[in-house]
Image (cartoon, rainbow, N blue to C red):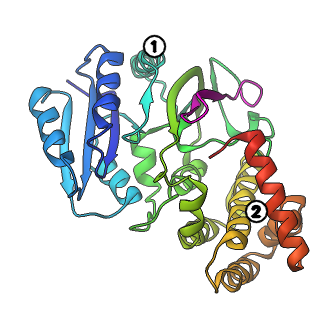
Amino acid sequence: MDKILTIGIPCYNSAAYMDHCITELLEGSGYAEDLEIVIVDDGSQKDETPAKADEWQERYPAIIKAVHQENGGHGVAVMKAVANASGLYFKNFDSDDWPDRAAFAALLEKLRAFKAADDLPDLVITNFVYDHAEEGTSHTVNYHHKMPVGRMFTWDEIGRFSKTQYLLMHALTYRTEVLRAADLDMPAHTFYVDNIYAYVPFPLCRKLYYLDVDLYRYFIGREDQSVNEKVLTGRIDHYWRVARVMMHAYHLFDDVESTMLCDYMMGYFTIIMAICSVFSKLSDREDALDQLDALWAELKEYDHHMYRRARRGAVGMLTNLPGEWGKQFTVSAYRLAQKVVKFN
């Protein structure tokens, strides 16, 4: 049977929680055989992840495919799933997250309708929910006031996004052909590459559709999670790498045709540079601030227009105030934003 959707699940020592993700996908789809699940074992060695992946494939060979590779990191594993995808559309699920069953069924039904009508959007956008384990609370990110609901649209029809709301990886279902055409540069052994995934392909997406369902449940609470503040601070060099890939992907004001998309991408890139600034200041690395200065200098040389927008705007100014007082103010502002928005 032709596959309407491929779900990629990168797994690295994920035995403790991958079963839940896979089960919810299967049951949410009604074990539909036009669904494909590609489990990518990213060189797991500390638990039963490789064996579990093979067992799932043996149980549901018409739906599940197990792929094994040497450890390459999250981005490499995502792209391995893309390379092995048979589905018309592709969506990534991290192994510790899971779908809402009803919302997942609604997504599959909508994708089938697109195919039957021979009217295919390049990108389908859905909502996602942050589940905060420690607090027992959840926070839904939706796009009700940012884009049309229930019809095809283009980037020129989106609204302006706030600095706390962007189209993250959890919200995106790409047409597989478009995602492959983006030829994403996912650095190996690098966290936070989901920002590349949710940025570089966008100019290739001409037709969009917003399905207003709360599909993706994003778990926050494990101490080893990449979005944990201590973990992120210790991996600030990963964010520097990601920022450079995003920086060099486009001269935004020359390469992106849609004014609204250019504005959106500039805002998103500005936030990435702000994250680099904040966590470089939080880092214990002796060279962190020198590396941050080098990153800003590289942006200035690469594209002065992008530099001016990112560095001289309100966000850039507030996250790069000079001196020790400026550093303390930046860190305090971040702490306040984290409490309000609860993004990690």
Which numbered disc, 2 or 1, marks the residue that appears first in the sequence?
1
Splitting the image into 4 quarters, where does residue 30 fall? top left
Q: Is residue 105 magenta?
A: no
Q: Amino acid at mark 1?
A: Ala
Left or right of 30 in this view: 260 = right
Q: CA distance from mark 2 to mark 1?
A: 40 Å
Q: Residues within 10 Å of mark 1 (few under 14, many from 20)?
A: some
Left or right of 268 in this view: 126 = left
- Residue at numbered disc 2: 253
- Residue at numbered disc 1: 102
Left or right of 215 in this view: 33 = left
Can residue 321 be seen here? no
Residue name at image x 81 percent, y 70 percent: 305
Residue name at image x 59 percent, y 69 percent: 236
| Residue in the foreground of this view, choosing between 65 and 42 | 42
Q: Residues within 10 Å of mark 2 (few under 14, many from 20)?
A: some
**Quadrant showing the N terminus:** top left
Left or right of 43 in this view: 299 = right
Label 2: which secondary element: helix
The picture places residue 332, in percent across and down from the top left corner, at 83, 58
Q: Is residue 144 magenta?
A: yes
Q: Amino acid at mark 2?
A: Phe
The picture places residue 156, in percent across and down from the top left corner, at 74, 39
| Residue in the foreground of this view, choosing between 112 and 309 | 309
The picture places residue 243, in percent across and down from the top left corner, at 61, 67
* Residue span colored magenta: 127-147
Residue name at image x 40 percent, y 20 percent: 108
Label 1: which secondary element: helix
Residue name at image x 60 percent, y 72 percent: 240
